Image: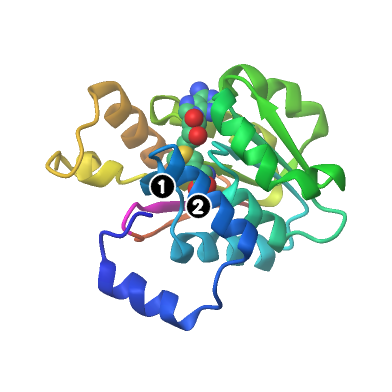
Amino acid sequence: MRKQNPKSYEYIESLMMPESALMGTARSHAKDLGLDAISVSQTEASILKFLIGANGCKKVVEIGTLTGLSALYILEALPADGRLWTLEKSAEHIEKASDVLAEEITKGRCVIVGGDALEKLPTLNSAGPFDAIFIDGNKAAYLKYFDWALENVSAGGLILVDNIFLAGAVWGDQTLQRFNEKQILNVQTMNKKAFTTEGLSTTIIPTSEGLLVCKKN
Ligand SMILES: C[S@@+](CC[C@H](N)C(=O)[O-])C[C@H]1O[C@@H](n2cnc3c(N)ncnc32)[C@H](O)[C@@H]1O
């Protein structure tokens, strides 16, 4: 769980209801994989859920499933007839997420799309436009994911992108975590594009990771 502002996150989370048993399973699967640090925190997940719910979203795409934790939060925000397509390339992660999301998959509310997201995204075009697109996959592909999202988000829909600070690397600080030039340039370009594209209202929620929030007018 990412907590670079431990006190504020601790305080916010002390006010929240505990996470569900399934969310706990998603977190322990991520821990087993040694990847619990890259799952959304409860605070970040609650922001995601709030935005998707408040915007009345029904059809959502997520890029980067990991063990299904953020997917569970998104699904909680959707109506009974809502649907989430979540894309993941790692077979190991898909196995863990399939366990956590089994009930939602059976109900037809969730589809895990296996494979490289850049190859798989075009296969979803015919199911769109989508009311929200949450980008949390390969950082070096963020700009391409964002371009796909611009084409496939509905009018009034949201594009949400996690980790857009790259642990400070977007403003030149590489002390916390090292990112390569391609990743940094990619995310910097996407962030600028988000603020300069006509027909988009954009802001950044300054979580420790940085959450880019765009609404198509
Ligand atoms: C930060 S984690 C996602 C965390 C998840 N959204 C959560 O909070 O529960 C990023 C995920 O993206 C996946 N990923 C990385 N590159 C990918 C690609 N090219 N296509 C699809 N998934 C990819 C990784 O395997 C990893 O599971």
Question: Magenta span covers which residues?
Answer: 208-213
Q: From what the image shows, is residue 147 above or below residue 108?
A: above
Q: Amino acid at mark 1?
A: Asp
Visible in this render: residue 144? no
Image mark for residue 36 = 1
Q: Residue at x 81, y 28 (%)?
A: 126
* Contact between labelled residues 2 and 1, with CB atoms less than 8 Å apart: yes
- Label 2 element class: helix
- Residue 12: where, in percent of width, then height? 41, 77
- Residue 72 occupies which quadrant of the picture? bottom right
Colouring chosen for the image of the structure:
rainbow
Q: Residue at x 14, y 43 (%)?
A: 173
The foreground one among 128 and 11 is 11
Image mark for residue 206 = none
Q: From what the image shows, is residue 71 above or below residue 149?
A: below
Image mark for residue 27 = 2
Q: From what the image shows, is residue 107 above or below residue 34?
A: below
Residue 156 included in the magenta stretch of the image: no
Q: Residue at x 42, y 53 (%)?
A: 211
Q: Amino acid at mark 2?
A: Arg
Q: Is residue 207 left or right of residue 121?
A: left
